[in-house]
Amino acid sequence: MTAVKQRVEDSDIDPNFKYELANILGEKALLHCFQCGTCTSSCPVADDVDIKPHQVIGMTLLGLKGKLLQSKTIWLCAACLECAENCPRGVRSFYLQSVLKNLAARANNLPEGIREEGEIILTTGLAIPISSGILKRREKLGLPDLTPPAAETFQKIAEVTGLASLLSKKGGKEK
Amino acid sequence: MMDYALFLGCIIPYRLPQMEAAARKTLQKFDVNLHEMQGAGCCSDPAATPALDYKAALAVAANNICIAEEMELNILNLCNGCFHSLKLSNETLKNKPRLKEQINEILAHVGKEFKGTINIRHLLEVMYKDIGLERIKDKIKTPFNDLKVSVHYGCHVLRPSNVLNVDDPLRPESLDRLVKVTGAESIKYMQKMNCCNYCVRVVDKDISLKLSAGKMKQVKQAQADCIVLLCPGCFMQFDLSQKEIIRLLEEEMFSIPVLSYSQLLGLAMDIPAKELGFQFHRVKLKKLFEKPALFA
Ligand code: SF4
Ligand code: SF4
């Protein structure tokens, strides 16, 4: 099943959406996509998503903002950068999709795993918790003591960028 | 003498310190002077923070870069993910003055300012381009003999190649040649350039492991003795989750040890296995060490 084959109503279309994204990204390349599908053919998760990478760009160009922002599978991504590397039109698809996710997260479409990861990074300054077992291993390996980062710095960045309130909403609408 | 601010990130120091130990011990032998970055934290993660807010991700990365700017040193990364986050942010902010202004407004709240005065490097470049194969060869004490290696570069050291500029994204050769200089053989295998899919895990662990299984199968079919890689994310996937991955293949159980490049090099330089942290690997290297005539 592909989302682009579904019936589209006039009211589903936001003709300015592509310009909105181009503006956020600060580049117009996405407007030059000619739907060749190279991004999808090099994408490791293409078989596991209902909206393929080239369809994400195609739907963006059509202005199907609501459908894209409610899609669960835009979050399924290996961050492998194949789509951005191989596009013959210079569309940095992965980065465009990141901006889409920024908007989706604010539209209540945020997988719990990503929320948790963001929360730990932006409250502690580290992506993984400190474990005493690992610190013992460091000692055995003769490694220097670690000074953990200043957590307040990361908390402040989360606060100023408006992320703090988004990240504290545990278990939003997602499964 | 080369001086670098060492950026450790999170996974290496707090999860896989053996990768750090091996890198420090081998770099020392080539007169690379490493300076600790006080206050540095998560790089921003190539996937998670940018997906939440691209400006927050840039600010988190830039905050780390500022520490090295104050030290007046270029940054050396051991992790592909950190390298990607920091280099991409560094180049973006250097080239987009309006965005730089916006990020500096955020950084002003934490008493920092991004200036754009340093460069971001990866261990792979420093080994291959700066130290070079010749000098590495000179330090090899006991070259490997008949060791078949599946080389795995990892996405975030190669792509996007126009920004990272480390090696050819389709046919890279730096790591293969660095492996060959230890006497080991870098074997050809299908799916060599495929992603480890570690980043998929936070969203869907089953799909992540399923995708990795395809690659493991090819490594096995090519009869590799071990996997040599650079990135701790890939290491987590191929070492810590190897059993789960192989189970998905519904074949007879097997195991293939995983080493970071520095660990492989360290062995060939006669650094004791214990100092390189092999005791902390989930997939034991016993069979590898027992292989007759591993060392010439
Ligand atoms: S590779 Fe580029 S031009 Fe081709 S479909 Fe994907 S984004 Fe569009
Ligand atoms: S970065 Fe994501 S969308 Fe792009 S090819 Fe890789 S997995 Fe697919």
Image (cartoon, rainbow, N blue to C red):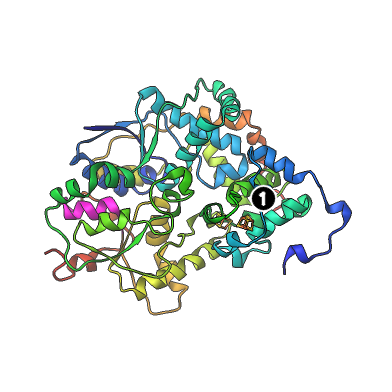
Looking at the picture, how far across and down is residue B215, in whole percent? 43, 68
- Nearer-the-camera pick, A100 or A154: A100
Judging by the rendered image, the residue that carries numbered circle 1 is A32
Q: Quadrant of ligand 2?
A: bottom right
Relative height, residue B146 to residue A116 (above, below): below
Where is residue A84 drawn, in percent x and y? 55, 52
Can residue A70 be seen in the rendering of this structure? no
SS at circle 1: helix
x 71%, y 56%: residue = A58
Residue B130, image x, y percentages? 27, 41
Identified by mark 1, the residue type is His
Location of residue B262 with respect to B240 vertically, above or below:
above
Q: Is residue A127 left or right of residue A25?
A: left
Inspect this view and state whether residue B181 appears: yes
CB at disc 1 and ligand 1 closer than 8 Å: yes
Picture mark count: 1
Quadrant of the rendering where the C terminus of chain A is positioned: bottom right
Q: Does residue B139 belong to the magenta stretch?
A: no
Q: Is residue B264 left or right of residue A16?
A: left
Whether residue B260 appears in magenta in the rendering, the answer is: yes
- Look at the picture and state if B209 lies above or below B128: below
Residue for point 30% across, 70% down: B224
Going 47% across and 46% down the picture, which residue do you hit? B162
Q: Which residues are magenta?
A: B259-273
The subunit carrying tag 1 is A
- Residue A54's spot in the image, x, y percent? 65, 59
